[in-house]
Image: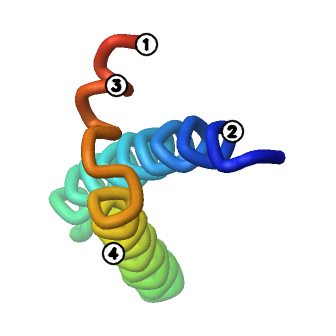
Amino acid sequence: MGPEHLALMIPIVAIVMGVGSGMLKMHYKHKERMMDHMSTDQIAELDQMSKIADILDQRVNVLERILDDEVPNWRESNDKTI
């Protein structure tokens, strides 16, 4: 796998992870509003999932910063492929 493949794969992975983490966050924010109907175990699981979504969001941000350094115009070239 050459650098051109890597330059294409990283933005795709970053976008998928970004969308996924955003969807997870929205889902669990909605679930927080339903907390009065949840058991203690469910609340603990929700907290864990929220932390995982935050970690995924941080990873996407790191990947985007790496891409900004390694492939300065990756955002523009990625917009054209979608």
Residue that numbered label 3 is attached to: 77
Query: In the depicted view, which residue is nearer to us: 21 or 13?
Result: 13
Q: CA distance from mark 2 to mark 1?
A: 14 Å
Q: Is 55 situated left or right of 10 in this image?
A: left
Residue that numbered label 4 is attached to: 58
Q: Position of residue 36 (x, y in %)?
A: 22, 69
Q: Identify the mark nearer the N-term, 4 or 1.
A: 4
Q: Position of residue 71 (x, y in %)?
A: 38, 51
Q: Position of residue 7 (x, y in %)?
A: 54, 44
Label pair 1/3, CB-CB below 8 angstroms = yes
Residue found farthest to the right? 1
Q: Is residue 37 in sight in this rendering?
A: no
Query: In the depicted view, which residue is nearer to us: 81 or 42?
Result: 81
- In this rendering, is residue 22 above or below 82? below
Q: CA distance from mark 4 to mark 1?
A: 25 Å
Type of residue at label 1?
A: Thr
Disc 2 packing (10 Å; few <14; some 14–19; many ≥20): few
Q: Name the residue: 41% across, 41% down.
A: 15
Q: CA distance from mark 4 to mark 2?
A: 24 Å
Q: Position of residue 44 (x, y in %)?
A: 45, 87
